[in-house]
Amino acid sequence: MRCRTINERICNIKGNEQEINKLVDEYKPFIASCTEKVVHRYVRYGEDDELSIALMAFVEAIDAYDIEKGSFLSFSASIIKRRIIDYYRKEKKHDNVVSINTYSDCENSEIDLTYEKSVCKYAQDEESKYRKMEIEEFKEELNKWGITFNDLVKESPRQKRTRKLSEMIVGYIISNPQVVRTILKKKYLPVSEIEKNLKIPRKKIERMRKYIISTVLVLTGDYDYLKGYCLRIRRGGARHEGNSC
């Protein structure tokens, strides 16, 4: 039977290596396009590691796809983006190790300042690129909740007392995995439960709703740089070593 949509086709070829390889060949331009949107430059098969990562991610998406997830192409694009970001994270950690060893070996020798500056500039550029990617990823996540960066600016607590309340609420949520799961799965803030347990008026919680949700998304998500901009919070009244925006 001929499949009318790519979604149906994916469901029918699961486990069929020959058909999967055929699909991958057909969608190489799509895979390359997804990759370029993440890395912000032109890429070529056989030359760029990112494309190899993207190909494997596309196959991973085929295996993991459920037609109830919606569009396969959107789903696979998301997997490709995530795997490339994971790849950059691993590369960044590796670069840090190499850098430490290099300086250790050169401890008793004259350092080539030109080379050192070049290395530092490259590291800064890579960090800047990764930070922008992370911000874009977070922006897309917020869109799913109907939240914009402008909303966060408006709702960010400015008074010390309000900041303490937001820290208390976020600390309570993060220390309760079931509450976190409820928020992420149902995409809403359990205001009644927070009001009952923390004795904070509903009106004050509602006023900071988008800010609280965004902070929880940062703390429970894969946002290394954004977590660096957050403040230490209290979990259930005790010191919590996490961060809160």
Image: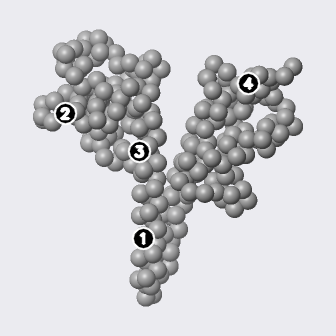
The amino acid type of the residue labelled 1 equals Cys
Task: Name which of mark 2 and mark 3 comes first in the sequence.
Answer: 3
The amino acid type of the residue labelled 4 equals Thr
x, y percent for residue 192 = 29, 11
Residue sitting at x 83%, y 39%: 22
Task: Name which of mark 4 and mark 2 comes first in the sequence.
Answer: 4
- From the viewer's perspective, is the residue at label 1 or at label 3 nearer? 3
Residue sitting at x 34%, y 25%: 173
Helix, strand or loop at disc 2? loop
Whether tag 4 and tag 1 are in contact, CB under 8 A, the answer is no
Q: Is residue 235 visible?
A: no
- Circle 3 is placed at which residue position? 135
- Circle 4 is placed at which residue position? 5
Name which quarter of the figure residue 94 lies in: bottom right
The residue nearer to you, when weighing 38 against 227, is: 38
15 lies left or right of 142: right
- From the viewer's perspective, is the residue at label 4 or at label 3 nearer? 4
- Circle 2 is placed at which residue position? 157
Whole-number angstrom distance, CA of label 1 to CA of label 3 = 22 Å
Helix, strand or loop at disc 4? loop
Whole-number angstrom distance, CA of label 1 to CA of label 2 = 36 Å
- Circle 1 is placed at which residue position? 120
The amino acid type of the residue labelled 2 equals Pro
